[in-house]
Amino acid sequence: MNFLTIIGEALRALRQNRLRTSLTMLGMIIGVAAVVLMMSIGKGAQFKINESIESMGSNLFIVVPGATSSGGLSFSGTIKTLTVGDSEAIAELPYVTATAPVISGTAQLSYGTNNWSTAVTGSTPDYFSVGGWSFDHGTFFTEADLRSAARVVVLGSITATNLFGDQEAVGKIIRITNRPFLVVGVLTAKGQSLSGRDQDDNVFIPLTTSERQITGNQFPGSIRYMTVQGASPDVMDDAENEIIQLLRQRHRIRDGMENDFTVRNLTAIADVASGAAKIMSLVLGAIASISLLVGGIGIMNIMLVSVTERTREIGIRMAIGANRRAILTQFLLEALMICTLGGLIGVILGIAGAWAVSELADMLIVITLGMVGLAFAFASAIGIFFGFYPARKAALLKPVEALRYE
Amino acid sequence: MAAVNLDNMTEHLIKIEKLCKSYRLGSKSGKIIENQVLFDVDLTIKPGEFVAIMGHSGSGKSTLMNILGCLDTPNSGHYWLAGNEVASLSNDALARIRNQYLGFVFQGFNLLKRMTALDNVAIPLLYAGMSRGKSRERALEQLRCTGLEDFAMHQPNQLSGGQQQRVAISRALVNNPQLILADEPTGNLDSKTSGEIMALFETLNRENGITIVLVTHEDDVAAYAHRLIYIKDGRVVRDENQRTTSATDEPISQ
């Protein structure tokens, strides 16, 4: 019997038992759909996290004043020990490209009749390059603005939308705590940061302007924190040591005393976050694979029942000339067809489900050809694996015993 | 593994020597309990014969039939089919013999359910490697010969017993076998239909030269055969030729 004819016989057998075939297939459909859906959700989350890591800027440290903990209490960021001078000194280090000292507060903004309350960040022009910001309109403020404490402002995209709607913002005057500021730039939206904070709802002004006119400063020259950009990913550890050594020296901390500042490597934090996302997507895939496995066992179960029920048919086929290979191939093909067809429908349903989730839950879904192929190949492998035992059982039946079976 | 040669012109189509068959029922306290069904059976059948094997139920006649049809294997003794020692043949070779050389007709018809008469007749051709389209043509031709052309697209449960048996005979004949083995072919049929089926066998034997071996316990069915072999308790007790004209002289149905 040639292969094409056996395919025909297998198809005929599946058609004769439509209900059973479709119920068995359902196990496979659900399994494959679950794998595709779960993997696309996992991949989406991973993609999203990587995106916010990239938006953060690369090779970054955050230096905050105060030790991380003292006697079990966290004092991070509460002590005013870090200064603009520290920031300038760190910028001179060999493994450091740039630094940006930051003071921040919140303030009321208005343009015409529009009001908006938002975070005001005071920093230097380097802030934008260190943080990896780009501009939709205009540009950043200059060193000259910084020196003269000019009233210029760069708007985050959400703030710009809230104050100006669709209008052009650059060149307009807005009021911050009732003082007029000239808008010089509007930033490109970045989305959420790793911690879930919106990075686009804010405004940026020169550090000096902020200190003198907006947030005020109890200790002139002190800063809230600074971001430091390392020269390359390979020298991050060296850069960290340099910063610590320099700051200990400048702050006159003796050996054995704790630092009065904390250096955080953002790249390390990002690695942890993307590692967690990878694990989540693996776990989702593994859970979904279990349903695929259960579907496979369902196929084996049904095929075993089918072999038992069709024992007499197998006997008749053998009596009129079927050899063992023909019987084996037919039953194996039946299992394989259930799996591949089920897998195909499952892939379609999985993609549809992923689309529905992204529409309804507003989640980012990533579907790759690789994972669709993987789910489909896995389904076929399950068909062969779980179909083989029943098929072999059928093929090894003795003709006379199979014929006598009632 | 010996090669099969089915075109041998041998004196004996079937030759059996000291054939024994027993079934293992189980084991009790280390001792194997067996039920012996055939005891040292010797038998030869020449090409073109029409043989009836008779005996009561449990006599071993069906077991003998299954061994003749290469569906079962003996425990000891020899069986040559067209000069080939059956015990030395592979499973694939046996499958090919059942497909090409033998035709089976069963008491319960053994047609595949939910499949048309045409498809049922075509299956042996498919296993012989013929394409689906060609096999259907050939099957239809065969059904025409047995007068079932109009029922080709009917499924077995839409046919009468006699029609089903004729479909089964068509299936047995479709690969032009040398030997037809019929196990109580009229057991499920009324006497009129039985007569028709037996007449068909007689024609096949007389006009096509097909060797026919049938198992029955009914004297009037056996009367169509030219040679009667009686089996009792697993042994051949009588082997006799009868008048070749008996079937036409004494019809079964009155």
Image (tube, coloured by chain):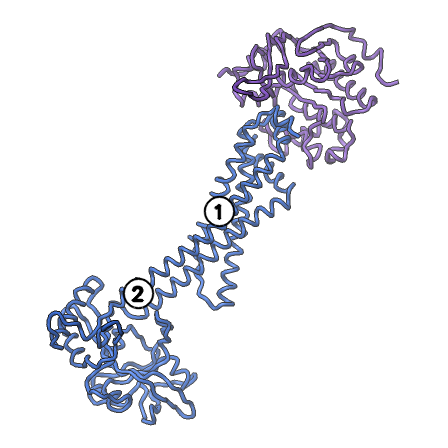
Chain colours: A blue, B purple
Query: In the rendered view of the protein, which quadrant contains the N terminus of chain A?
Result: top right
- Which chain is indicated by disc 1? A
Seen from the viewer's position, the closer of residues A57 and A293 is A293
Chain under disc 2: A
Compared to residue B5, the image places residue A213 above or below, namely: below
Give the residue number, with chain letter if any, for mark 1: A293
Q: Earlier in the sequence, mark 2 or mark 1?
A: 2
Residue B16 on image: x %, y %: 61, 9
Give residue A289's position: percent from left, percent from top. Answer: 46, 50
- Label 2: which secondary element: helix
Which residue occupies the extreme right position in the image?
A: B254
Residue A68 appears in the rendering: no
What residue is drawn where x is 69% and y is 28%?
Answer: B110
Q: Quarter of the image holding residue A199? A: bottom left
Residue that badge 2 annotates:
A270
Residue B53 position, x and y percent, is 71, 13
Q: Name the amino acid, label 1.
A: Leu
Determine which quarter of the picture holds residue A308.
top right
Label 2 to label 1: alpha-carbon separation: 34 Å
Q: Are marks 2 and 1 on the same chain?
A: yes
Find numbered disc 1 in the image and state the secondary structure of the residue it sits on. Answer: helix
Does residue A382 appear left or right of residue A190 in this picture?
A: right
